[in-house]
Image (cartoon, coloured by chain):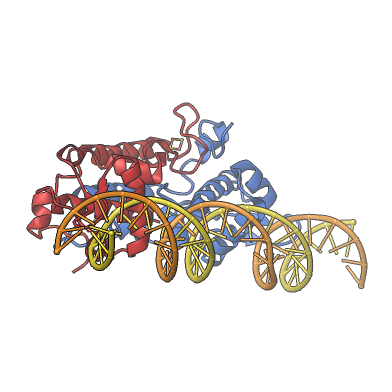
Chain colours: A red, B blue, C orange, D yellow
Amino acid sequence: MSIFSKTCEYALRAVFYIASKTVDGSRVGIREIAKNVDSPEHFLGKILQDLSRKGIIDSAKGPNGGFFLTRQALKRPISDIVSAVDGDNIFTGCGMGLTYCSEINPCPLHHEFKKIRNRITKMLTGTTIGQFNKDLLLGKILLKKP
Amino acid sequence: MSIFSKTCEYALRAVFYIASKTVDGSRVGIREIAKNVDSPEHFLGKILQDLSRKGIIDSAKGPNGGFFLTRQALKRPISDIVSAVDGDNIFTGCGMGLTYCSEINPCPLHHEFKKIRNRITKMLTGTTIGQFNKDLLLGKILLKKP
DNA sequence: TTAATAAAAGACATTTTTGTCTTTATTTTA
DNA sequence: TAAAATAAAGACAAAAATGTCTTTTATTAA
Ligand code: FES
Ligand code: FES
């Protein structure tokens, strides 16, 4: 297991890619995104449609259309993407799968797990969609393997 | 998503239960385990068979048979259970799903994610199967919801 | 040796996740 | 207006995870 679903991993990579390509206001097509993020094109299409419906990214049909992000959207935390795709179990759920996490009726790992969960939450709420644009454009950071 | 598969959550809960019930050397049947850990009986059976084949727990057939843990086994870290069931992606994989995690070609979240991953690893290698026996028997800690 | 007990194993069934392919709707531009 | 481009939507398909039921094997104890 990984901490995010594959769907969510595609979503994160794709949104980062769109972000880095739309700082100037242009749009990116699904084919290009899929290629640069190493994901199945049509499957990613659905994922982005969903994010678009939820208002996290924008899209435009027709020639010169594609997906893009507003300046506002670039400031959003990536926790928005994660909770849109994977729900919020990662933020609040019990590490051992109890039906809910409880301070007074904790599972064995509760104490330690809570810290980890908080750390994850902090990472996700503390980093914005647009934060890596520069490093992505410089190639210091990658969205698929070289 | 949760950080462990459901299968792994069942495994962890079950092994903790067996641990707390076999400090005296007796065995526990699958029905009792499943009931106390809130998991489907036969499905859990397979999981425990697997752990038994892999030498993490022991089992005995026939009357008075059941699953049990040796004193040795109680000292094992629970990371053994997790990697037996879920593999080691959680210990070494990339948070954003790149085919491998790389220090020189990192994904955007690499730096932060690495710390989290290390923390998870520390939790799993640092806690033993038998560690919670006392608290479990006292009911201070639970393996299913009350 | 027989009956009872309990895990092991096997064969499926269901659900969820992931992925593909085709058609439709919208927009732009010539 | 016609053609081209592109996201949206729909209908499936495949694979993986999760779950159920039945039969077999090993062990114990009477
Ligand atoms: S009860 Fe399990 S993490 Fe809180
Ligand atoms: S490259 Fe993604 S976590 Fe290291």
Q: B57 or B30: nearer the eye?
A: B30
Residue drawn 47% across the image and 33% down it: A106
Q: Quarter containing ligand 1?
A: top left
Q: A138 or C23: nearer the eye?
A: C23
Residue drawn 10% across the image and 58% down it: A140
The quadrant of the picture occupied by the C terminus of chain B is top right
> Does residue A110 sit above or below B125 in this rendering?
above
Residue drawn 32% across the image and 41% down it: A116
Q: A54 or B83: nearer the eye?
A: A54
Residue B59, percent from left and from top: 63, 60
In the picture, measured across the screen, residue D28 lies left or right of residue A108, that is right
Residue B106, percent from left and from top: 18, 59
Give the total number of marks visible in the rendering: 0
Residue A117, percent from left and from top: 34, 39
Residue B64, percent from left and from top: 73, 54
Q: Is residue A125 visible?
A: yes
> Does residue A28 sit above or below A113 in this rendering?
below
In the picture, measured across the screen, residue A9 lies left or right of residue B38, that is left
Q: Quadrant of residue B88?
A: bottom left
Residue drawn 52% across the image and 37% down it: A99
> Does residue B98 sit above or below B134 in this rendering?
below
Q: Quadrant of residue A143?
A: bottom left
Q: Is residue B77 visible?
A: no
Q: A11 or B104: nearer the eye?
A: A11
